[in-house]
Amino acid sequence: MLLRALFLSSFIILSVSPHTQAQTTPAKIDLAQPQDYVLKRTSSFDRSGGNADFRKIPPGQTLTILDVDGPATLTHIWFTLSSREATHLKKLVLRMYWDHESTPSVETPLGDFFGLGLGDYYTWESELLAVAHEHALNSFFPMPFQKHALVTVTNEGQKMVDAFYFNLGYRALLIGFPCMTVGLILGIVLAQATYHTIDFLDPIFFLSILMWFVYLLLVYTRWNAGWRGRRVAYLAAGAFVVAVLAWCAN
């Protein structure tokens, strides 16, 4: 029973392994299957419960759109706005900072980012960018970050942005390791209460603890070492093998 619980929790930990899809266009998702991430959103909704689901941006001011810790992957950006400034698609500047960097990785006029380089609205659609009716701007670029993400919009024009609506979706990845740690501790406590002794050289306990250390290494290589590609794929595969052995030992 102990190892069955630990084995189930080990599948949750797969959410912290550095998926290669975070670096490229995501594969099609099978919505009928459980996913290895938690989908989160941040938006301009009215915190008072009313219907004022927008923000104003005075001239010279900066609006913070996203300010969250990682690791995670930003997957969707949606903006729409109302401004009396004719060239607001050029005067609004979008900036994105990853992992506490001092200078932005993305710094561009808002319209340019969404393919409206001439500063006028046109309805068009592609796999990664789309501009719908009523000035709805959409981005589906997958943007992974390790420690932190900060997205801002600055009004460098002369007129107030009367209403700026936003809705951003991101996939939080670091959820499995805490669950696995809690499962391991609870398993040890229950075993001690049941058998009044614990033999850590027993294959069941040894492989369970080994599995925990392997996943700890996965978290470290993602968080600090910045590993990507085949190295972390091999490490994740090794962790899965240890998990299967722990199951078999039970």
Image: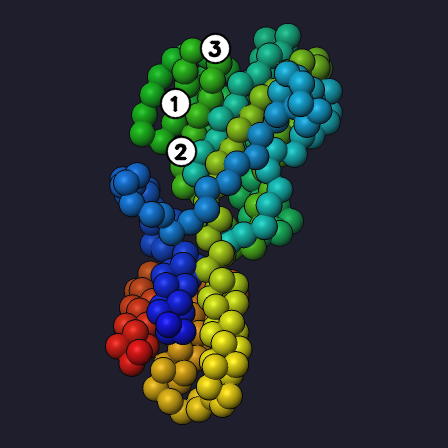
Residue at label 3? Answer: 134
Q: Residues within 10 Å of mark 1 (few under 14, many from 20)?
A: some
Q: In the picture shown, does residue 75 fall above or below 57?
A: below
Q: CA distance from mark 1 to mark 3?
A: 12 Å
Q: Is residue 186 visible?
A: yes
Question: Judging from the image, what secondary structure is the residue with disc 2 in?
Answer: loop
Q: Residues within 10 Å of mark 2 (few under 14, many from 20)?
A: some
Q: What residue is at 40 percent from the left and 67 percent from the top?
A: 5
Residue 21 in the image, given as x and y percentages of width and height: 33, 49
Residue at label 2? Answer: 140
Which quadrant of the figure has residue 202? Answer: bottom left
Of the 4 image quadrants, the one containing the C terminus is: bottom left
Which quadrant of the figure has residue 96? Answer: top right
Name the side, left or right, on which 150 lies relative to 249.
right
| Upstream in sequence: badge 2 or badge 3 | 3
| Upstream in sequence: badge 1 or badge 2 | 1
